[in-house]
Image (cartoon, helix red, strand yellow):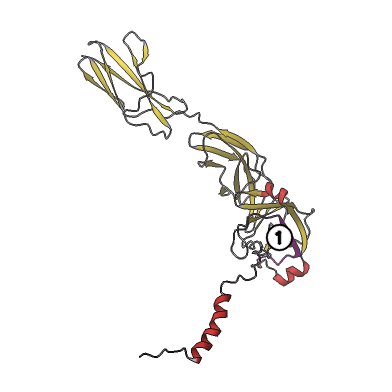
């Protein structure tokens, strides 16, 4: 007969300890506070002088300091500290603690004003320098903070400094010419220029970004091949006096151009006529036009009448013209036509049928 075994005292004590803990596992704790919407500080701040203005360029903040999606900003604040300029050839620098001690608020843009200063993923802030320029020159240092959607401010950006000076004259005149390869910008010479900066913006954009092209002192033209047909573009050119940091003239006015496709494709090369019985076979090479729609074929009869043989463009690189009378001389023309209806100059060939 088997005796019934009872749990030991030690086991009963262990169960009494674990049961309250197991019950507590299902209990919900206090809710976590919502994450803070502190913008990550701008790790890049670019300063340049354009005419009598200072431009500050920084990336638009996309994340919080914790790396979460930010969801926009409410304001941007610029601080400025003015210090004596270092001797020529000495580095331009200021200690962060010194900056914090003497900096003053210079500019603050609210959300509605920021829209006009934002281009793509960059913010460009601009403000006028006090005139006349001081003698001896003064160094100006800047830092930027951004305000998140819940009112919390980021840390200061790295400091950016510049010693402003009298700007050079802008280049004149400024001209735009539409070409098949793109838009050509031409400008006049400015004596003593270190170079020129060419800027482009789309007409719908309020601000220019980085220079489209940094031209040397001897350059007077630049061909912008990065445009699209039916795009409307605005250009300007500034004279460059210093490259690091950039000091340049006021813009040389602005010129706007609607870049329309009015450029016919080049004629097909290698047009050849091969005689056949009562017919002629025409062969040619492809036209290199990127927007090619096809080819039109014409024949000039012995009586002098020019006829269009292909009412609609053909995409083949050959054409058979039949029903021709022997003993006469015929001539043919083949033109390339693009998708906008621009027809190019003809390639021509002549053949006397035996």
Magenta region: 70-89
Residue 209 falls left or right of residue 102? left
Quarter of the rendering containing residue 272: top left
- Report the residue marked by disc 1: 163
Q: Please give the name of the residue rendered at 38% of the width and 18% of the height, measured from the top-left corner.
A: 311
Screen quadrant of the C terminus: top left
In reply to whether residue 84 is colored magenta, the answer given is yes
Screen quadrant of the N terminus: bottom left
Indicate the position of residue 237 as horizontal and vertical percent values: 62, 44
Q: Which residue is at the far top?
A: 303
Task: Using the rendered image of the protein, determine whether residue 192 is visible from the camera's viewpoint.
Answer: no
Indicate the position of residue 209 as horizontal and vertical percent values: 61, 49
Whether 327 is drawn above or below 104: the answer is above
Task: Using the rendered image of the protein, determine whether residue 251 is visible from the camera's viewpoint.
Answer: yes
* Kind of element beneath mark 1: loop
In reply to whether residue 80 is colored magenta, the answer given is yes
């Amino acid at each position: 007969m088997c005796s019934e075994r009872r749990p030991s005292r030690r086991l009963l004590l262990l169960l009494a300890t674990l049961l309250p803990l197991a019950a507590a596992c299902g209990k919900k704790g206090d809710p976590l506070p919502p994450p803070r919407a502190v913008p990550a500080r701008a790790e890049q701040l670019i300063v340049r002088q354009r005419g009598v203005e200072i431009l500050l360029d920084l990336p638009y903040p996309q994340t919080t300091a914790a790396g979460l999606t930010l969801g926009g900003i409410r304001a941007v604040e610029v601080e400025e500290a003015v210090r004596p300029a270092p001797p020529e050839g000495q580095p331009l620098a200021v200690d962060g603690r010194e900056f914090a001690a003497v900096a003053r608020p210079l500019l603050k843009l609210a959300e509605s004003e920021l829209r006009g200063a934002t281009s793509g993923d960059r913010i460009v802030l601009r403000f006028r320098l006090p005139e006349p320029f001081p003698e001896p020159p003064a160094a100006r240092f800047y830092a930027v903070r951004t305000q998140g959607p819940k009112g919390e401010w980021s840390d200061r950006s790295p400091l950016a400094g510049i010693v402003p000076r009298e700007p050079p004259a802008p280049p004149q005149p400024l001209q735009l010419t539409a070409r098949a390869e793109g838009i050509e910008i031409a400008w006049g010479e400015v004596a003593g220029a270190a170079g020129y900066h060419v800027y482009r913006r789309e007409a719908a954009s309020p601000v220019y970004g980085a220079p489209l092209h940094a031209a040397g002192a001897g350059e007077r033209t630049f061909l912008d091949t990065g445009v699209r047909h039916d795009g409307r573009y605005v250009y300007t050119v500034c004279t460059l006096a210093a490259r690091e940091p950039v000091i340049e003239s006021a813009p040389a006015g602005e010129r706007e151009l609607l870049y329309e496709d009015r450029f016919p494709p080049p004629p097909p090369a290698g047009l050849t006529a091969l005689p056949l019985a009562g017919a002629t076979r025409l062969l040619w090479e492809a036209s290199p036009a990127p927007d090619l729609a096809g080819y039109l074929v014409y024949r000039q009869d012995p009586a002098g009448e020019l006829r269009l043989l292909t009412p609609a463009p053909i995409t083949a690189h050959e054409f058979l013209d039949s029903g021709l009378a022997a003993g006469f001389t015929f001539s043919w023309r083949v033109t390339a036509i693009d998708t906008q209806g621009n027809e190019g100059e003809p390639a021509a060939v002549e053949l006397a049928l035996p």
